[in-house]
Amino acid sequence: MSFKRTLLATAAIMMAMSGLAATPAHAEDTTDALLIRLKEKGILSEAEFNELSARRRTEIQVTPPAPAATPQAAAAAALDDKKLVRMMDGGGVGLQLGTVNLKMSGSINAFYTHESGQGPAANRIVAGGLVAPGDDTSAIRNGLLPGFLKFDVTTNQGGWDIGAHFGMYPGINSVTGVGGANSGGSPAALSTAGIDFRQTYITAGRPGFGEVKLGRDIGLFASEAILNDITLLSVGTPGNNPAPSNTSLGRIGAGYIYTDFQPQITYTTPKFGGLQLSAGIFQPLQTLGSTAFEVNGRPGFQGKATYDFKAGDVGAHLWLSGLTQRHENGALGNYTGRAVDGGAKLSFGPGTLTGYYYTGRGAGTTGLFLLSTDALGNPRKSNGYYIQGTLGFGKITAGASYGRSSINLTSAERADRASVLLSGNYSPLLVDHNESYVGQLRYGLTDWMTLISEWTHSRSVATGGNKASSDALALGSILFF
């Protein structure tokens, strides 16, 4: 074999070895340098150089070696998965600690609210009315929602999804503290805000079974009414604007009865298509405003059914709920409070239309079992409704609604009103109905923050003819995370 042929063979072997053993960048530099040096020394002709270069490009496959395991990777592989910390998906802010999920979610809002009243006058006093006669007032206050901070700790144990839930609802306004965290406002220096610990409950569920809830959380009856109300994000009827408390009234008492947060044991089924059912036993509530000594030996009962439908840009959310509770009013006798409600929220692309109605006997108005009986313990009938529409334009949403809540006199009260001498069972100052009109404009500044402007006209009318009304303008923002 000639010297030249030996060099060519050696070059080919080196090319093959460099392609197998080196990184791609290093193999390319070494082989190119060798071929160029052989050509410069005259050992390779131009044709031989071109042939070997082409052969290198087409025949030699450069395969990078598998990376060696780092000490960090080896340590991570050896860790118990239960001890790892991972980020969580979904809303709120949270993380996974092994098999335990920790999530924190919350909301804050604040509004400048100016309410124009009619001024104090005897013919504007309405007992149970949402509008108090008074002059113009201004406030920096919470809307219908106070702020809230909720913690959820969930995991799966033995095939069960187990959860512990805590919800704190602090307001930005100071309160007197007399009667609880949502007591009357105290707009004076050195006062403090209230914290309403509304939620403390356990959940246990599994696929195919549904979920059981034990503790304090939002009720079933009338819960959909407030959750689908546009004033939930804003102010609505201010309520005591000169000395604001933790919340405004929104549309409570002017379209629906407040569902409240109540101690309960409830069961919710899995979804059957779009249908879901809930039922529960509840802490029995006393009659608000009654002077009788009430001790209730039976729990309250509530239930709810919802149905969701979606087809393209058309959707529907339908609901029906109810409650019943026996009241043992001592000297005034016993009565059973009952109520049912139903509603529908229809969506058509960027627009929604919502309608709601409730009726009850001995259920009260504004709050559960508030003004639910006359002075003799006879249950009053009540009813109410609201209609609402929204339309979205990109980040802008415009909404409007009207609602009304009425309560009727009992037969004993009507007879007393018709008599020449009132016995005291009837009062002409008693509210006949509350109503409000709302116009709202929202702008989604970010995924978390929404800017809101709103106008609300509220009106209260007594059975004896007294009337009070006000107009409120609210400007502010609400943030969810």
Image (spheres, helix red, strand yellow):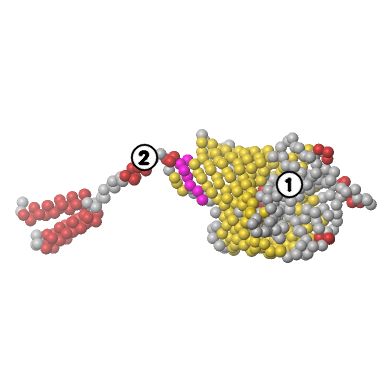
Q: Which residue is drawn at 81% across and 45% down?
A: 373
The residue furthest right is: 420
The residue furthest left is: 2
Residue 232 seen in the figure:
no
Residue 97 belongs to magenta span: yes
* Mark 1, secondary structure of its residue: loop
Q: Residue at x 51, y 50 (%)?
A: 93
Q: Residue at x 65, y 59 (%)?
A: 189
Return the residue nearer the eye: 409 or 333.
333
Which of the numbered marks, if any, corresponds to residue 22?
Answer: none
Which of the numbered marks, if any, corresponds to residue 78?
Answer: 2
Quadrant location, the C terminus: bottom right
Return the residue nearer the eye: 139 or 232.
139
At label 1, the amino acid type is: Leu
Residue 283 seen in the figure:
yes
At label 2, the amino acid type is: Ala
* Mark 2, secondary structure of its residue: helix
Q: Note whether 126 is above or below 81 in the view shown.
A: below
| Residue that mark 1 sits on | 368
- The answer to whether 251 appears left or right of 348 in the picture is right
- Image location (x, y in percent) of residue 261: 66, 46
Magenta segment boundaries in residue numbering: 93-99
Mark 1 and mark 2: Cα distance apart in space: 58 Å
Q: Main secondary structure of the magenta part?
A: strand
Q: Note whether 58 is above or below 158 in the view shown.
A: below
Q: Which residue is drawn at 58% across and 50% down?
A: 149
